[in-house]
Image (tube, helix red, strand yellow):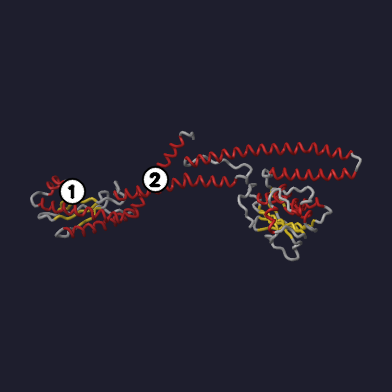
Amino acid sequence: MAPAMRPAALSLRLGVFFLGGWALSLVLLQVLLGTRTGQAQIAQMAPQVALNLRLSELALERFPPATVSQLSGLQLGVGQPPRRPRSWGLLGQGDDVRLERQADQLQLELCRRLPRCPEVVPNHGAARGVWIELASPLEPVWLYASIRPRFGWPPDPLLVTLSLASGSVMAGALFLLLEVQRPLRQLERAMARVGLEAQPEPMPQRGAPEVRRLAQRFNSMLLRLEESERERATMLAGIAHDLKTPLTRLRLRLSMLGDASASARAGADLDDLERITGQFLLFAGGGGGEPAVSVPLAELLAELAARYDGQPVELDLAPVTATVQPIALGRAVANLIDNALSYGQPPVRLVLRAWQQDGFELQVWDQGEGIAEDQRSQALMPFQRLDEARGGHGHCGLGLAIAQRVARTHGGELRLGGEPLVDLSPQEAPGTFCVSLCGHSLVAGRVRASTICP
């Protein structure tokens, strides 16, 4: 839709809301207040009908009924009143009952205002009304008085006024709900997905002008974020490529040196440099573009633990299948095992258990003292290294931060110390300090928007 046409379309929808609200309010008020308005109508018409009766009776003393009807404009009938057959439908029967009640009410009103109590006969059918008996000296004469039906036109002025007021309120509330609140909720959900999805869908620009401008700004922000993400990916790919060449040349030169001890020490420094660079690139890259696949976690973790051949890493893996990002999850678990081997006490035990319906929990146990409770939040921050870790080789304070990001990507959380979500028996608990990574299967390859682990 062209921008010039949007205000016109919005005004048209607003007009439809108001017209629909007025019509609906009028119908509802007629349904709810129809009996009361019918009684008020009879009370209002009774004085005029009583006056017409008195004047017609006075005129009949000198003129025939036809002449009185022609001169006064009143509808008079001679003889027995014409009776229309009742309707046999459900709606018709309801209207007949109401007409009977209105006729009885009119008779009571006339009996109060006249010296005698006239007979009132309801007239069913299209010409809805009543026949009222006149006091005639010669022959029976009847005066016809029409009664407006419950849903007649024009409607009662009081109901019209009330319907305009209530319909305007209903139309305003509906407009706010459909044109303001619903787009704002969609915008809120879209903003919650920013950073959790690789490329969130742009917001449709609809609703009130202010909401459309917000959606336009949001879509512009998504374009800027996408462009920034492309630039970051290009930069990281260039850094990774450019670092490989000088590192390879340095290793070649070290291998040509005659001093084996110096070559070994320099090679260890190069390994640390490669590890730090890889951790930084992994943390900066995010890994959110990796597709989620259904894998048996026990086999994935067993293959990962095979890299630690000869080191004290024990496995206690339950058969659990989940839809995860296997590369990212493997890197997170490898960081946890490396931290346990570097800063904890052997042996390190990796435990896998199912949790709830589609959840899993990975527990890395060691025999060390662990991290003090007042330092655990600091340990999860990027580039934060505790005092006990200052002498580590190849560590830059990103291992736990990467593991926490992977856990949150899978709708979970990384827990340092404390009680695991899945309790183990005293025989199964293999250490004194536990780092727990919990998560759920990804839904259709998408990241969950909220943390589900307590």
Q: Quadrant of residue 202?
A: top right
Task: Tell me if 403 is positioned left or right of 308 in this view.
Answer: left
Residue 39 in view in this figure:
yes
The residue located at (17%, 60%) in the rendering is 117
Amino acid type, label 1: Gln
Residue tagged 2: 20
Single out the residue that lies furthest toward the left: 62
- Decide: is 376 above or below 194: below
- Where does label 1 land, which residue? 75
Front position among marks 1 and 2: 2
**At 73% across and 59% down in the image, what residue appears?**
434
- Percent across and percent down for residue 387 are 75, 53
Q: Residues within 10 Å of mark 2 (few under 14, many from 20)?
A: some
Could you say which is closer to the camera, residue 28 or residue 138?
28
State whether residue 13 is above or below residue 35: above
Q: Is residue 52 left or right of residue 37?
A: left
C-alpha span from label 1 to label 2: 39 Å
Please, which residue is most extreme toward the front here?
A: 387
Q: Residue 129 at x, y = what percent?
A: 24, 52
In this rendered view, identify the residue nearer to me: 294 or 172.
Answer: 172
Count residues near mark 1 (Cα–Cα under 10 Å), then give few for <14, some for 14-19, many for 20+.
some
Which circle marks residue 219 in the picture? Answer: none
Amino acid at the residue labelled 2: Gly
Residue 290 appears anywhere in the view: no
- Identify which residue, 74 or 157, lies in the foreground: 157
* Residue at the far bottom in the pictured view: 426
Residue placed most toward the observer, 235 or 53? 235
Quarter of the figure that contains the C terminus: bottom right
Q: Is residue 221 left or right of residue 100?
A: right
Which sits earlier in the primary sequence, circle 1 or circle 2? 2
Callout 1: helix, strand or loop?
loop
